[in-house]
Image (cartoon, grey):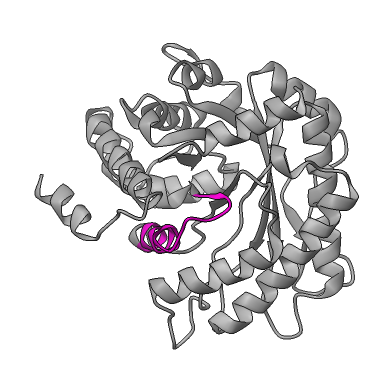
């Protein structure tokens, strides 16, 4: 895939009104989600759940890409392999390629993401299975005296190595440096750590010859810590997040697809909306949500075939709300109207 094709793919994922469904939960994470609704995490149940999401009628109006897990990219729905099913709806299939965050040596409380060994070969296989983009997540923790520069730069280096290999393989890399918002830190502390993180990441991306035009950034929003006594408003979150990103993210990057982290479904939508409302911006500001798109659908489904349609309606509604947030046109009243229907 040429540089121009990488740019076209990245731009298509974040086309007008569209974002990403993150359906790349690891075995451990999907088990927790299923435990919450009293459903056993078997391959059959996971297949049934992913199929209800991927076959939701009309959702392609708001979803431009789906991040899959290794198991899921190999599974088939009633209508054929999941990547082909998604592509037939105009949704671009992607794949999570990291092997998870592990303890960073000599750095208590800090993590490093593994998965670079053998990555070139895995990328080739995933491309053959239908993937057109990839994702790698780094985890940065805010705490006493952390994150260290050591943690920031080792994770940034790994993210850039991954991104360079992805572009070499003709796959658009989604670069995800997540600063966790767990804790009681202020929004000012969140800004400072996110700023340091983005500085390291884009320095490494440049040094490792990653083309910004052919990638997407999946970052955290700049929020108050979830346990902080003073919670910033949606407008403050939007202002501080944009102030941070204007300092560090090249305008050549086609899109920023925010993660939802531990935000409620509606907060994640409202914060994205507030950022787009103060646009235009150099990049598309979109979403790459997992739980914030899926939680209502998972609850409605509860593992029962007779609930599939209700679950699909719930997923479609959250996708539509986030599609509205892409243009700054979302309003909380739209949630209540859905309930009334």
Q: Is residue 26 above or below residue 275?
A: above
State the residue at coordinates (62%, 82%).
Answer: 189
State the residue at coordinates (78%, 33%).
Answer: 167
Q: Is residue 183 left or right of residue 334?
A: right
Relative to the observer, which residue lies in front, 190 or 75? 190
Would you say residue 317 sits in the magenta stretch?
no
Q: Is residue 192 above or below residue 110?
A: below
State the residue at coordinates (75%, 73%).
Answer: 109
Relative to the observer, which residue lies in front, 80 or 318? 318
Q: If the image is split into quadrants, where does the N terminus sit?
A: top right
Task: State which quadrant residue 89 falls in.
Answer: top left
Would you say residue 284 sits in the magenta stretch?
yes
Q: If the image is split into quadrants, where does the C terminus sit?
A: top left
Task: State which quadrant residue 108 falls in.
Answer: bottom right
Q: Is residue 335 above or below residue 9?
A: below
Q: Is residue 269 left or right of residue 27?
A: left
Q: Is residue 103 at all visible to an observer of this figure?
A: no
Query: Looking at the image, which residue sits at the far top?
Result: 79
Q: Position of residue 190 (x, y in %)?
A: 61, 76
Q: Is residue 330 left or right of residue 272?
A: left
Q: Position of residue 265 (x, y in %)?
A: 37, 57
Q: Position of residue 29 (x, y in %)?
A: 55, 49
Q: Is residue 44 left or right of residue 334?
A: right
Relative to the observer, which residue lies in front, 36 or 295? 295
| Magenta extent | 267-285
Q: Is residue 2 at all visible to an observer of this figure?
A: yes
State the residue at coordinates (80%, 63%).
Answer: 200
Query: Looking at the image, which residue sits at the far left?
Result: 340
């Amino acid at each position: 895939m040429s540089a121009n094709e990488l740019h076209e793919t990245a731009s298509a994922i974040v086309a007008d009104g569209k974002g990403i469904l993150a359906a790349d939960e690891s075995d451990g994470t999907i088990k927790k989600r299923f435990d919450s609704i009293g459903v056993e995490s078997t391959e059959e149940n996971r297949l049934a759940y992913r199929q209800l999401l991927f076959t939701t009628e009309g959702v392609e109006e708001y979803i431009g890409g789906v991040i899959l897990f290794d198991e899921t990219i190999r599974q088939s729905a009633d209508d054929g392999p999941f990547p082909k099913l998604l592509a037939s709806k105009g949704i671009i299939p992607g794949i999570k390629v990291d092997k998870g965050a592990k303890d960073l040596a000599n750095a208590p409380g800090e993590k490093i993401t593994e998965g670079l060994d053998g990555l070139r070969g895995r990328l080739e296989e995933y491309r053959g299975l239908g993937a057109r983009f990839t994702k790698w997540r780094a985890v940065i923790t805010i705490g006493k005296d952390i994150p260290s520069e050591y943690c920031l730069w080792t994770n940034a280096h790994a993210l850039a190595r991954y991104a360079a290999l992805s572009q070499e393989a003709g796959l658009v890399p989604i670069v995800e440096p997540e600063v966790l918002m767990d804790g009681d830190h202020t929004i000012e502390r969140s800004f400072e750590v996110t700023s340091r993180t983005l500085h390291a990441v884009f320095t490494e991306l440049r040094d490792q010859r990653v083309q910004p035009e052919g990638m997407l950034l999946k970052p955290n929003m700049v929020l108050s810590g979830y346990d902080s006594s003073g919670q910033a408003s949606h407008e403050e979150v939007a202002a501080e997040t944009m102030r941070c990103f204007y300092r560090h993210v090249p305008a050549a990057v086609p899109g920023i697809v925010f993660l939802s982290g531990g935000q409620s479904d509606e907060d994640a939508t409202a914060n994205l909306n507030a950022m787009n409302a103060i646009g235009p911006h150099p990049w598309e500001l979109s979403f790459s949500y997992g739980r914030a798109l899926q939680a209502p659908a998972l609850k409605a489904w509860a593992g029962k075939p007779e609930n599939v349609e209700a679950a699909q309606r719930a997923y479609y509604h959250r996708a539509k709300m986030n599609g509205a947030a892409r243009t700054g046109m979302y309003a909380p009243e739209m949630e209540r109207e859905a309930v009334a229907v």
